[in-house]
Amino acid sequence: MIKFKSIVLQLKEEEFNDLCQQFVETKADKYLRLLKLYRENKYNDEEIQGMLDVNTSAYYTLKSRLFDKIQDFLTNNMSTPIIDLLRKVANIPTLIYDTHRDTAIAILSKLESELQNYDMPYELSSVYSALKKLHLHSPKYYEYTQLYNRHLAYTIALDKAEDLLNTFMKTVGDYFASRNKAQVEYLSLIKLEMSNINALYESHHLQVYKDMLDVTFALFVPNPDAMKDDEPVEDILARMDKTFDTYSKDNNYQHLQLVYNALSFEYYHKLNLSKKESKFYDEVNKKLNSFLLYNHCCFTTHFLLSKVERAIETGTEDQLYEENLESLPNYEADKSDIPNYINWAKYSAICAFYAKKYQEAVQTLNGLINDISFKNYPHSEIEVKLLLALNYSMINKYDPATSLLRSVTRKIRELNDEMGYENALVFYKILSLQMSSSARQVDQKITQLFAKFELLNQKSNRMLEYIKVDENFIKTLSQVVKR
């Protein structure tokens, strides 16, 4: 279902102003008012209907027609060299059936050159198919048949590689949210299949997809054996950067540059090289609203969690909440993409936590729990409930916090993996101790337990790494029970 209000909110300021001006010029006052009311994002449909003074049927007709006008406006404003080329490709049947053969061949040859310049292999197949037809009675028929067949086979391989990359990124998210060890083997098989496809053609497109997959694997998948023949990550990243620079007109690469920046940031962040990570962080962070839409080719929301870790390292975690409001004012996470939705909710909650807006963090996490099923994501269920219990304890709501902690211990018993979740059990003890009014020397005991938690929180079941454990936090925890 298309979210009409979301589309209006996501309009760029220039687009919104141009659309308003269009309605002013055509004296479409009701469309203009409805557009502005949606843009304000203060009213629901019933309130807007009353303000426009129309009945329900007229309101939904008006809304539908406004949506059509916005679609037309956005489509007509898509004018780039790539779009113009695609329009020319779409016009190929006219060249075949309604244009003199010599003229058609001249146009197609020019189009072939332009498509090669922009490195658009899919569209080149259509050009070679047309040239093949136009040279049916010419010695060049065989040449164009070979070119067509080769490009067709290549585009099929490219499609397969893109599908593998998409499936890989989806599975990385599933693994991160579940920590299901069986998915590590599946991810390793996808990695191997990508290598096999890449070996079939000498193609920079295929190489880039393989490089993106290999770097993501190195960052997020705990299987060293599957990486034993890989090049160093830094060398892979350097090759990607060189490819993007060489084929700067490639429309896909202009977008994938952002993925390269994110992978580079994650790599240097993992190595604690703050100076090297900084420039890549800035590039992604300033385009964060767009980057989060790249979830088909990148594990996007992990950047948000790394962003919190970076803020803790630089002592700016208390600025995250306001920065989030400013940089992502109208962002709506896709609830059907559960792993990325979980990360988004955790990030939103932890931003509120550091701003001491504990009730808002509680609402965000409760909304997450109500919106999705954690059936296939036990790791995330444990982590989210511990984070929610922490926020409840900060506002002295110990009954729901205790209920959540019981749920966590039941889940760990169900998994029969207490050794793997010793970190979670220690965090459970910290919160239980913090909520115990009879406890003595709470701060010392909490300090000792946090030291144990950090020691255990290094394995594949690592969680809550974005909680800054320092003297102030421990002092706050210790004093909550006395409030």
Image: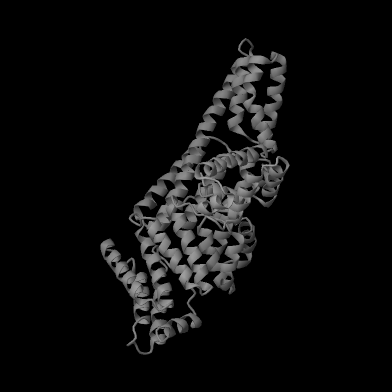
Q: Is residue 140 left or right of residue 174?
A: right
Location of residue 87 with respect to 373 vertically, above or below: above
| Residue at figure coordinates x 68%, y 45% from the top left | 19
Decide: is 22 above or below 147. below
* Residue drawn at point x = 61 percent, y = 60 percent: 327
Residue nearest the observer in this picture, 169 or 203 = 169
Which residue is nearer to you in this view: 482 or 441? Answer: 482
Which residue occupies the extreme top position in the image? 137
Q: Relative to 54, does residue 304 appear above or below in the rendering? A: below
Relative depth, front residue between 7 and 85: 7
Where residue 286 sits, quadrant-wise, is bottom right
**Residue closer to the observer: 103 or 229:** 103
Q: Position of residue 149 (x, y in %)?
A: 54, 24
Q: How many marks?
A: 0
Whether residue 239 can be seen here: no
The C terminus sits in image quarter: bottom left
The quarter of the picture where residue 222 lies is: bottom left
Residue at 62% in and 39% down? 69
Q: Position of residue 220 (x, y in %)?
A: 46, 57
Colour style of the rendered protein structure = one colour
Residue at point 41% right, 48% down? Answer: 188
Residue 8, how many percent across, how many down? Answer: 59, 49
Which corner quadrant of the image does residue 205 belong to? Answer: top right
Give x and y (percent) for residue 258.
61, 52
**Residue 2 appearing in the image:** yes
Rendered position, 112 above or below 282: above
